[in-house]
Amino acid sequence: MTEPVPVVDALQILRDRVAAAPLGLATATRDDARRVAAGLVDQVDDYLLPRLRDLDAPLLTVVGGSTGAGKSTLVNSVLGAQVTRAGVLRPTTRAPVLVCAPADRAHFAGDRVLPGLPRTTSDPPFGAESAPARGAESGRSGLELVVRDDLPPGLALLDAPDVDSVVEANRDLAAQLLAAADLWVFVTTAARYADAVPWDLLRTAQERGTALAVVLDRVPPEAAGEVAEDLAGMLQRAGLAAARLFVVEERPLTDGFLPEDQVAPLRDWLHGLAADAGERAAVVRQTLAGALDSLADRVGTVVDAVAEQTAAADALETAAAAAYARARADVAEGVGNGSLLRGEVLARWQEFVGTGEWMRSLQGSVSRLRDRVTAALSGRLTPAADLHGALESGVETLLHAEADRAAERTVTAWRTLPGGPGLLAGYEGLDGMSPAFPGAAADAVRDWQGAVLDLVRSEGAGKRSRARALSWGVNGAGAVVMIAVFASTAAIPTGAEIAVAGGTTAVGQRVLEAVFGDSAVRGLAARARDDLDERTAALFAAEQDRFATLLAEVAPAPDAAAGLAEAVAALAAARRVGA
């Protein structure tokens, strides 16, 4: 049995597989799965791996909440200094500010936590906007680091952007920062504590086992008890009864700070966590274990989406394969049912065997017909070149038509299948044959005709008594073989054309029998027909590859979903061993 890898290594493997999860097809669950995957990767990078590698690092407390809830004022009041900007403009907190003790600066100045956010260090009260740095080019905001002597070691406070900011990037960053917290201090107000957005995030905290404190801000003094009791009941019903609840009454600010008696309970509790290594470790263990426990369900969402991607890719591939298989079958039918023995081909064939005597010849003896056609084969009558050209043109026209139909059927099917419209977007001309197809088809038909002549030469090489006749008319004999191929199933409806097709087949067979023998005739026609089918298959496979190439860029590997599930199982095994 394979030994479990360490938890950190197992988590890294899981993280990498989730980051690489193939979610390129626009299926029903794709967008949700992408958000889940991105959030999971961020949390592993920002919190889980750094925390697992350093369990004794300072407690990162993220202060988050709704727009205008008073987060920045609360942070400044806890610290007793203006370290983060509070105001009335929306969004109020535009860039996150992290405050730590001098002894803890090294833990946050580098990229141990939140590695995707560039750092700037500034002196209070406020720093300049973050300069462009690693991560800034992707649009992610920087992290302003403020060092304060009056904040105890072991504790860091981070003032996050609004969770319901009008700026989407701020909302995303707030969610990312909350997922990176050891402890989440959620700030809401008496007027907004029942809003949907805060409770969506509180439910996320509950699902992930995040250690949580809730600050109910701006509460009218006369309603403090009633509102606090209502919020406490909501927390309990949501499975968050363990969350610490602090109530801040609405009072006039003093020099921009909350009254001391309103902020002291929260400050004392936070400072107590910083001073008590055991309590601090308990908070870390709660959040760390909860985050790790949540991974299986979250990865399960991605696994299901990848499985849906696989099913969608299979359906798209099947649709393309069916369209081109049908095209190949239709070409085979068109080649063998006599439909090509009309128009130019029929005219050239009649000219080839002698127009004036054609219909009368059908009623004469086979021997006289054989003599007539044998004379034609010797080249003493109309050359076979025109007939070859007409046959070539007819087959090419058939190939073009079926290539167009196959492409159109594929595009039509893809437009109705999950993921198909997104793949087709931006690509024009896929609903018809490719620009290279006419040239490839012409080459294939000419090569086929050459192969038929080679068959005739090869078959005639062993017929000494007929070698002279064959040497006189290889092109003509080859043309008769091709005519036999095209009339192999001859199902033509009208009486006159039945006679033409039947006579064509009879003449071709009798002439070839006279030169090669009965068994050789059937073999030549069958081999020529099979050769044309193989060349048709190769042509259509190249056309189908246009769709296969598009699909290959986004289709999951067959074991993609299983690989994610295996990584989850490996992490669980590593945790059991390390417990």
Image (cartoon, grey):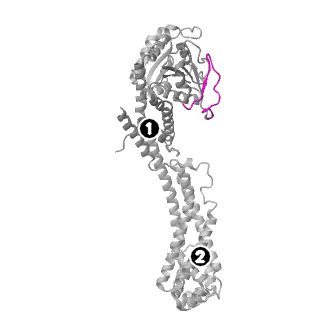
Specify the label residue 9 is tagged with. Answer: 1
Specify the label residue 108 is tagged with. Answer: none
Residue 137 in view here: yes
Task: Give the main secondary structure of the magenta stretch.
Answer: loop
Residue 508 lies, in percent from the top left, at: 54, 83
For residue 51, above or below residue 78? below
Q: Residue visible at 52% across and 61% down?
A: 324
In the rendered structure, which segment of residues is drawn in magenta?
115-137
For residue 570, above or below residue 76? below
Q: Nearer the viewer, residue 369 or 242?
A: 242
Where, quadrant-wise, is the C terminus in this rendering? top left
Q: Residue visible at 63% across and 72% down?
A: 393
Q: Residue visible at 61% across and 59% down?
A: 434
Q: Residues within 10 Å of mark 2 (few under 14, many from 20)?
A: some
> CA gap, disc 1 to disc 2?
62 Å
Q: Residues within 10 Å of mark 1 (few under 14, many from 20)?
A: some
Where, quadrant-wise, is the N terminus in this rendering? top left
Is residue 275 highlighted in magenta? no
Residue matched to label 2: 450
Which element is circle 1 on? Answer: helix
Residue 358 lies, in percent from the top left, at: 60, 85
- What type is the residue that disc 2 sits on? Gly
